[in-house]
Image (spheres, rainbow, N blue to C red):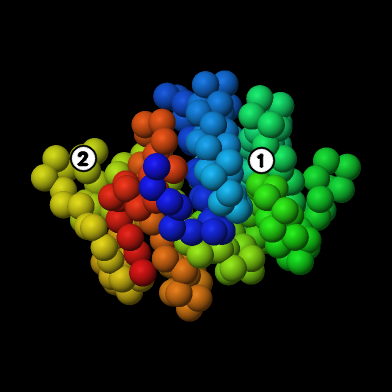
Amino acid sequence: MSQAQYKRVMLKLSGEMLGGERGFGIEGDALQFVAREIADIQKLGVEVAIVIGGGNIWRGSRASGWDMDRANADYMGMLATVINSLALQGILETKYNVYSRVMTAIHMQELAEPYIRRKAIKHLAKGRVVIFAGGTGNPYFTTDTAASLRAREVSAEVILKATKVDGIYDRDPHKFPNAVKFDELTYFDVISKKLNVMDATAITMCMEAGIPIRVFKLGEAGCVLRAITGEVGGTLVR
Ligand code: UDP
């Protein structure tokens, strides 16, 4: 088996990944699939940090349709990420024997540790999977930005951004069959071409820290492992 290229990685999953075909709520098989992928790389000795979104439950952008204040709706979204994080932790530990910690940006000590950077680094160094929940703890941000921020804070070497397609295309490949995939891009390309991969705040954070982003498809078994051994193409932003 090829060797992992990285010692410490940040895996960014969107909430939809837990929702299976429907992309809504939490679906058992989808949750198990994601957990198994994580267990596989953790057993290789890779230190795994995770940020998981909440879009399978709630997104702050729904606020306008509900006549709701955006900040309020964003806090709901942040809580949705906590539900997903606890679901992932539960299955990682019970089914796959992988020790993990959920650390929240919004304090809720009864169910998870508050985020403390030095503690997070310690957990990672001890081989525990650390799941950062609650986004950045601030409204008007995304979990992509939370992933970039935490990756930088804990010195992750790469962000592995799992998506439904196998990389970044010039247009939506679901709508345009002749869309062209990029193998490699600069951070600036992503921003200037307005490529829909991560929001500009998240990209800028990675650019400043020089953290590469590998965008790959969460599809077949072993895809996360292949993303860290470099066997899966996807698109590399650096
Ligand atoms: N959110 C927020 N601040 C953050 C991160 C997330 O307010 O730092 C809210 C925002 O409403 C967002 C929701 O949480 O829509 C869920 O996160 P996201 O949309 O990034 O999830 P994903 O699309 O990755 O599932």
x%, y% of residue 82? 69, 42
**Residue 115 visible in the snapshot:** yes
* Residue picked out by circle 1: 85
* Residue picked out by circle 2: 175
Is residue 36 shown above or below 63? above
Q: Secondary structure beneath disc 2? A: loop
Is residue 162 shown above or below 196? above
Residue at 69% over, 31% down:
97
Of residues 59 and 84, the one nearer the viewer is 84
Farthest-out residue, front? 1
For the residues bearing labels 1 and 2, Cβ distance under 8 angstroms: no
Farthest-out residue, right? 110
x%, y% of residue 81? 64, 43
Density class for disc 1 (Cα within 10 Å; few <14, some 14-19, many ≥20) is many
Residue type highlighted by circle 1: Ser
Q: Secondary structure beneath disc 1? A: helix
Residue at 66% over, 47% down:
129
Of residues 62 and 158, the one nearer the viewer is 158
Q: Quadrant of the N terminus?
A: top left
**Residue 194 visible in the snapshot:** no
x%, y% of residue 173? 22, 43
Farthest-out residue, left? 178
Is residue 86 shown above or below 31? below
Residue type highlighted by circle 2: Lys
Residue at 38% over, 47% down:
2
N-term mark: 1 or 2? 1
Disc sitting over residue 162 in the figure: none
